[in-house]
Structure formats: C-alpha cells, structure tokens
Amino acid sequence: MSIVVKAGPGDSTDSVIRKFQKKVVMEGIVQEIRDRSVYRKPSELRQEYLAEKRRKIMRAKRYAR
C-alpha cells in the first residue's frame, strides 16, 4: 500500500506535503495505525459495535417525526 504524490510544475513543497497528508487521511492509514496501536479484546469490539448500533437506533427514533 504505497501512496504516490506527484508534484506539478507550479506546486510548492508545502502544497505537495498537504496533498500527501490529505491522501493519507483519505486512505484511512492514520486511523488504522491508531486502531492497531492498542490491542482490544473481541468482547470490547463487540460492545462498542452494539453501543453504536443502539445510538443509531435512538437517533433515528428521535429524528423520525
């Protein structure tokens, strides 16, 4: 998984760095590194998933009028 950013003829180094950072964020690499930095047990992942599901249901009920 490599990210390549080519500098155009009028691009400064700052703009190329900004393009690179934007691509990294869009690819989700930063979030993946954060997720992998700490081990979470499968039961914790399941609890987070269920809590998010409950939040979505409650939000849908609240705005479904």
Image: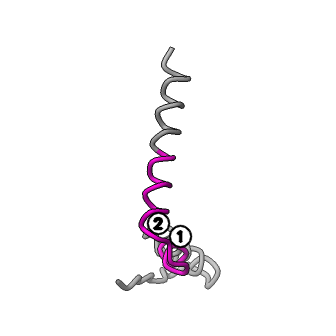
Under mark 2, the amino acid is Met
Q: Residues within 10 Å of mark 2 (few under 14, many from 20)?
A: few
Name the magenta segment's main secondary structure. Answer: helix
Q: Position of residue 33 (x, y in %)?
A: 51, 78
In the image, residue 7 sits, relative to residue 56, either above or below, namely below
Q: Which residue is mark 2?
A: 26
Q: Position of residue 54 (x, y in %)?
A: 49, 39
- Residue 47 among magenta residues: yes
Q: Tell me if 54 is positioned left or right of 14 in this view.
A: left
Label 1–label 2 contact, CB within 8 A: yes
How many C-alpha atoms fall within 10 Å of the one at disc 1: few (<14), some, or many (≥20)? few
Residue shown at the point (45%, 81%) measured from the top left: 5
* Gap between marks 1 and 2 measured at Cα: 6 Å
Outermost residue, left side: 1
Q: How many numbered marks does the figure carry?
A: 2
Q: In this image, 6 relative to 62: left or right?
A: left
Tell me where the magenta segment starts and ends, as one range. 32-52
Q: Nearer the viewer, residue 58 or 21?
A: 58
Under mark 1, the amino acid is Lys
Residue wearing tag 1: 22
Tag 2 secondary structure? helix
The answer to if 37 sits in the magenta stretch is yes
Foreground residue among 64 and 21: 64
Vertical position of residue 44 compared to residue 56: above or below = below
Which residue occupies 44% across, 63% down? 43
x and y percentages locating residue 21 in the rendered image: 56, 75
Farthest residue in the top direction? 65
In the picture as drawn, the residue positioned furthest to the front comes out as: 43
Left or right, residue 51 beside residue 27: right
Name the residue at 55% across, 78% down: 38
